[in-house]
Image (cartoon, coloured by chain):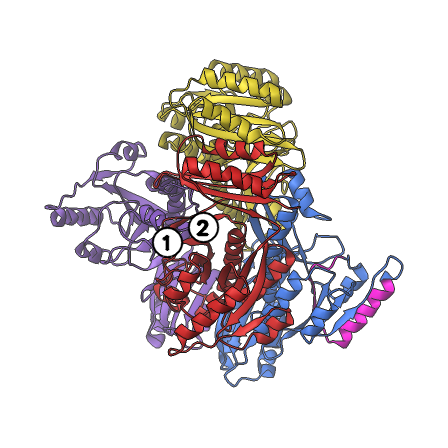
Chain colours: A yellow, B red, C purple, D blue
Amino acid sequence: MERGILVVTCPDRPGLISAVTSMLALHGTNVIEAEQHSEPTTDRFFMRVEFEPRGASFDAVASGMTALANQFEMEWKLRSSARPKRMAIFVSKYDHCLLDLVWRVRQGEIPAEIACIVSNHPDLQHVVEGFGLPFHHVAITKDNKAAQEEAELSLLRDYAVDFVVMARYMQILSPVFLDGFPMQVINVHHGLLPAFAGAKPYDQARDRGVKIIGATAHYATAVLDDGPIIDQEAVRVSHRDTVADMLQVGRDAERLVLARAVRAHSEERVFLDGRRTVVLG
Amino acid sequence: MERGILVVTCPDRPGLISAVTSMLALHGTNVIEAEQHSEPTTDRFFMRVEFEPRGASFDAVASGMTALANQFEMEWKLRSSARPKRMAIFVSKYDHCLLDLVWRVRQGEIPAEIACIVSNHPDLQHVVEGFGLPFHHVAITKDNKAAQEEAELSLLRDYAVDFVVMARYMQILSPVFLDGFPMQVINVHHGLLPAFAGAKPYDQARDRGVKIIGATAHYATAVLDDGPIIDQEAVRVSHRDTVADMLQVGRDAERLVLARAVRAHSEERVFLDGRRTVVLG
Amino acid sequence: MERGILVVTCPDRPGLISAVTSMLALHGTNVIEAEQHSEPTTDRFFMRVEFEPRGASFDAVASGMTALANQFEMEWKLRSSARPKRMAIFVSKYDHCLLDLVWRVRQGEIPAEIACIVSNHPDLQHVVEGFGLPFHHVAITKDNKAAQEEAELSLLRDYAVDFVVMARYMQILSPVFLDGFPMQVINVHHGLLPAFAGAKPYDQARDRGVKIIGATAHYATAVLDDGPIIDQEAVRVSHRDTVADMLQVGRDAERLVLARAVRAHSEERVFLDGRRTVVLG
Amino acid sequence: MERGILVVTCPDRPGLISAVTSMLALHGTNVIEAEQHSEPTTDRFFMRVEFEPRGASFDAVASGMTALANQFEMEWKLRSSARPKRMAIFVSKYDHCLLDLVWRVRQGEIPAEIACIVSNHPDLQHVVEGFGLPFHHVAITKDNKAAQEEAELSLLRDYAVDFVVMARYMQILSPVFLDGFPMQVINVHHGLLPAFAGAKPYDQARDRGVKIIGATAHYATAVLDDGPIIDQEAVRVSHRDTVADMLQVGRDAERLVLARAVRAHSEERVFLDGRRTVVLG
């Protein structure tokens, strides 16, 4: 059944929940789920409402929001669940996050469409095409990076992509690319950021002798492994675990945390508040 | 700073969040935290709002709620954070849950008052009085149980007690006693209910060879270890863990889960929905 | 590099670790990993040693063990890592555990071979054959169960299968079948056994209102969901989680716990001690 | 019942487990628990054995070890469980770790003796003396630090202290002090090191927007929050958790992780391997 998803953010002040839910009630919709957060450190208000239209048109609700937005300096977005977001998945050679995302989308766990797969290696072409999904091999070298990223951006426009998932894509996207999808590129890093940013986090972790490792899903920004964190997952290890053992349990953590982050992003649950995220619901 | 806590439950229907938050906005209050749940299996709506009065009187808000309650068949309760709930703690000989609760109340982690401690053994009298808290030894035998429970109920009335915490109280309270505090008696059981109800749950757990044990905080009802569950905590064990080892890690789980349940109950976060609980926030 | 895996169990008494490790040292092997357990409640000793042969023949080590076994009433088994165990996977229609096992075996996470897939439904034939694995559709009805199980046993003999994994196989295997693979049939149940044995465990869990659900991998026995537990995994839920939500997070728990159990079984880490398991390493 | 605890470390080579356990068997002891680790990156071997003497004298076992040590370049230590280690606890004003340690020692969870409490503030004197434990107020200022640390070291010698636990002691111990107790000073830091070392880790954590916080027990070294990690504990948080909320759940993590580390250290389970620890058992 079709649902509306309304997300709102504005300066915090009394009466905001009342204003939004009353407008929705006035149009005859039925709120299924509503969650909000008032952030004391930034005085921002965040709200996400999921509702059954019950005959109300999305245009009418949008008009209602336009009026409220003026009054309360709101930024807002209204979407129908009938038009899921479209993602591109960027991979290199590792397949675990890719397979997991494809399986979850097919299973209905993630309400989004996989528009295409892009890779700097041809290795996964066969498996991707076995799923009936488009695969594009865009080889990146030091010399052709700017041009190839331009080709990728063009591909993403052709496929009407809304956001990009770096499913263990072993390349750093340039600021130019990221500007094309601001805060719409989700990366997974196999460390509990900010610990062990950069290359070979499990080698770093074993060298430091930590007893807990993990994985982090975050929005990619121009600074490596520094963007707003969406979700994290921790795993207990011991002196017995070699780097190979960490890679093994780490893969499970990576695919879990990436799946949760992609689901939350697809369902419009993730808000930015400066460098932090607010994840509602 | 004083806050109002409003809890509401009623048959689910459109417009409920709007109705409650608009009434609160009308009176000039500021909502700090609001959470609600629509339960599809029972068609019940549950809501908890915490607000700053900003000059509004609690009487005025209560009048507003009375009007809404008629319209929407609401059951509701309004409390000021300035008047915390009062608990009695029932103990036998184990002290870990008792000490933990006393420490957390003093630390401000649990917004409630400890009115008195009741025990069927004198063992903990010294430590309780060292905290400056009243201790009452009410010895229970097979023959005097009815009379002694009557004495306990009388004590609780004298101390104006709102709810009872069985902090490893090794007695079963009779239905007569429980009728005096319906769904206001919190028990902690050292098993992941419904597994291992009854006596010696860790012996049962080791005999069955489980790899995960735990603890459960629940409302006591006339049927042993069968009441609505408020919170649970799981702990991984192995073949190496003896019953004594389980008791040790189990104590940590018990005090954590009991503290969370008592805090949630004190903050009016726990609603009953048949045999289940809805714990908001 | 080839390794020897030696597992030993016998009545507990002093000198057992010394006896086994001295015999291994005498033959010039190098112990990589050794773990043992003395169970106080049954007075049994359990030991698993993984060693580099360093030129020693497995026959010579086996002769050494034969001598020790007489002296200490030992039951023992010696295997080379060069000859991995062979498993058959039984499935119905759900694919998540199957896909996960196939992927982990290919990844090298589970040191075993998948000999064949058996199913009572044809649904997964295409995907299984896509992996280049043999698929056998053995439809079971009330009337043909005994004959069909005989056919399955015959298949398993043909494929030289060492153990069977029920990867969400929605049939109950008869005692006759299980006698053919005593304690070599691993099942996964989507409940934290002994809680919620039998059908629809998440419906049972939601009805009871628990706050922690989970999954259990265990050896199948003639009594449903009652066999020795190998591993368990717990997941926190709330009133918000519907049965469908539990199914979703439950699938992640099931595939993790089944993978760990199959790996431990493949590596000869699981010992039986009455109704319990000892899982070394 | 008295037990012997033997810990051994040496260059890795074949035959070590056999050598040690055979010597113990020869003297008629009964091994209750043995665990070892061969570290591939440093080629070191670590072993811990707990045994019932069964009439064997500790001197005889020590002689046996002396012979082995020469042959295998072993460092070793033999202790009787009848003579538990003695700890001093350093505190400032926070009492949660102190109370928890005192309770666990009395409960028998930690096999060690609390020799004395040292603090740079007088606040906890009353509660410490209520437990019948010696309290020493050693006020530290910028100007008197060297002299006061000398006084502390003198105290620790008087009390025959084996190791020091910094139970939220808000001072940095100087290298001179630490040289007096090399790798025998355990600190707890309320962050998942190496993340958020230094002051106000929860403020740092909230500023970075992490979804998992935690606590770390480690040996104190001359570099702040940089010593070998003994144990860690992770806790999930969300955008809703303020720094005050983190402090609250953090206290639970701190006392758990510190208790586990102090128990492991008291039981001689912690070995150093460069900058890492090996924690056996």
Please report, as a chain letter, where disc 2 is located.
Answer: C
Residue type, label 1: Leu
Whether residue A260 is visible to the viewer of this picture, yes or no, is yes
Q: Disc 1 sits on a residue from what chain?
A: C
The spot of residue A3 in percent (x, y) is 41, 25
Residue under numbered circle 1: C192
- Nearer-the-camera pick, C62 or A245: A245
Quick check: is D167 in the magenta stretch? yes
The image quadrant of residue D187 is bottom right
At label 2, counting other C-alpha atoms closer than 10 Å, the crowd grade (few under 14, some 14-19, many 20 or more) is few
| Alpha carbons under labels 2 and 1: distance apart | 38 Å
- Please give the range of residues in magenta: D146-170
**Residue found at x 86% / y 59%:** D141
Task: Tell me, yes or no, if residue D195 can be seen here.
Answer: no
Apparent side of residue B104 relative to residue D52 in the rendered image (left or right)? right
Residue under numbered circle 2: C1
Depth check: give the residue in front, C34 or D262.
D262
Q: Looking at the image, which residue sits at the far left?
A: C143
**Image quadrant assignment for residue C62:** bottom left
